[in-house]
Amino acid sequence: MDMAKPHAALLSSPGMGHLIPIVELGKRLVTHHNFTLTIFAVTSPMSPAESHVIQSSMSPKLFDIVQLPPVDISGLVDANSSIVTQLSVMMRETRPAIRSAISALKPRPTLLIVDLFGTESFPIADELDMLKYVYVATNAWFLALTIYVPFLDKEVEGEYVHQVESLRLPGCKSVRPEDVVDPMLDRTNQQYVEYVRMGSEIPMSDGILLNTWADLHPTTLAALRDDGLLGRVTKSPVYPVGPLTRTVSASKGQLFDWLDKQPSESVIYVSFGSGGTLSCEQTTEIAWGLELSQQRFIWVVRPPSIRAADASFLTAGNASGDDPLNYLPDGFLTRTRNVGLVLPLWAPQADVLRHPSVGGFLSHCGWNSTLESITNGVPMIAWPLYAEQKMNATLLTEELGVAVRSKVLPSKKVVGRQEIEKMVRTIMEDKEGNAIRARVKELKQSAEKALSMGGSSFHALSELANQCEVRMQSQKAQAP
Ligand code: UDP
């Protein structure tokens, strides 16, 4: 190991939406900023997709990944508790393993970067004399709400969803009560307590990394840095370092052979992230909406669930034996066989979105999916389901102008086939969609600029590297 290089330890919580951004941040730190790196990944026992990400990030081998199996939390949480509660408890209970794994590293890393669920490991960094950063792998507006929620907790009476007025965040766009993140839906639930805790722990870091770029949220970032506004809460510096998205693998096989034969920007890709599941009725309406739109499509289908919209989050890519194709309308597959592909459970999404034949994305608005769409210049239909996705949908439609959405939130009411047909046509071919298609291409360029040498995101990670060097120098000076 090169002793002159900064050495960072990155900690990822279970779930594809957490592992992927940590791995991509790791790649960037090594290839562009000369870091040595070890990733500690607490993984879900049941997710083949996570194992695949870990394996594929090993060639070329840029860093070590140490898998930390989650401890059994069955005696600590109810089996039906929310994903936020489960992840919080898993990460809390894994702390002894995290501590011994980091202490065993020689030489000791200078820096610990955790994701949103890892902030309770900050005391480990303090104890081991490491800088501590949090990577909030989503956008600036979500960060603003999260760090401000401990204040809202004191100011707002009753449930947030029952408020008449939007929730005000100093210097930022207000959040409509119907858009609040899942943990804020019920203040008596443990996930709310966990979320408020995270909001109060983030500002204890030495710095906050965001998977976005400066030009995407100038107003919110300014508020987060302004001591007269949210800066007095943030306290630590905020570094937008993105958009960091999955690098493409060799895209081969039937799916890509099919895509190669389709006209440019003619295919809409439909997928609800690693966790998204729909009701039976909604699955039927999407099938009809796609068919009526007469557009080419690729649809990643899962068996319906009425239990939760994020039912497959911790089992991504895992077949349950329940064939999702059984839930499609009679004759759908035969009638659409010349224009559509239906893929059970999982697709190589980053590669699909990068293909020139893809021209639209019906998405659950997970932030990774959102970035994968924007960085490929693909306009969206925003279909938020869980986590912070309702805020993301509002950002995409009302502020950034790169998506359309249904009149009523899909979590409140089944969206009918005619409305789906109309939205698909709008982003794919109607004149009405021209502005959206042009805007997303502008954002694609703006993202490329931010990541290029000397761009704002490149510069932000260089600052992080500088902080590490300063710490390494001072540690050397103090060494006996
Ligand atoms: N993903 C994929 N294939 C799928 C579904 C998801 O490769 O069939 C990837 C997707 O490209 C993204 C991640 O899984 O990188 C999902 O992250 P996101 O933040 O969009 O949503 P989450 O799954 O965390 O809700």
Image (tube, rainbow, N blue to C red):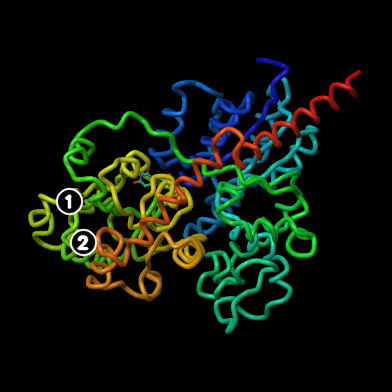
Marks 1 and 2: CB-CB under 8 Å?
yes
Q: Quadrant of residue 403?
A: bottom left
Q: Crowding near pointer 2: few (<14 within 10 Å), some, many (20+)?
A: many
Is 167 situated left or right of 411 in this image? right
Residue hosting label 1:
340
Is 167 situated left or right of 228 in this image? left
Amino acid of disc 1: Gly
Judged from the image, the secondary structure of the residue bearing numbered disc 1 is strand
Residue hosting label 2:
290
Identify the residue shown where x is 51% and y is 70%.
179
Image coordinates of residue 151 in percent, x first then y, are 73, 68
Identify the residue shown where x is 29% and y is 51%.
359
Q: Height in image: 420 above or below 335? A: below
Image coordinates of residue 176 in percent, x first then y, are 55, 74
Measure how far apart labels 1 and 2 are at the Cα level. Answer: 9 Å
Res 194 seen here: no
Image coordinates of residue 204 in percent, x first then y, are 76, 50
Amino acid of disc 2: Leu
The C terminus: image quadrant: top right
Q: Height in image: 248 above or below 36? A: below
Of 310 and 132, nearer the camera is 132
Identify the residue shown where x is 74% and y is 29%.
110
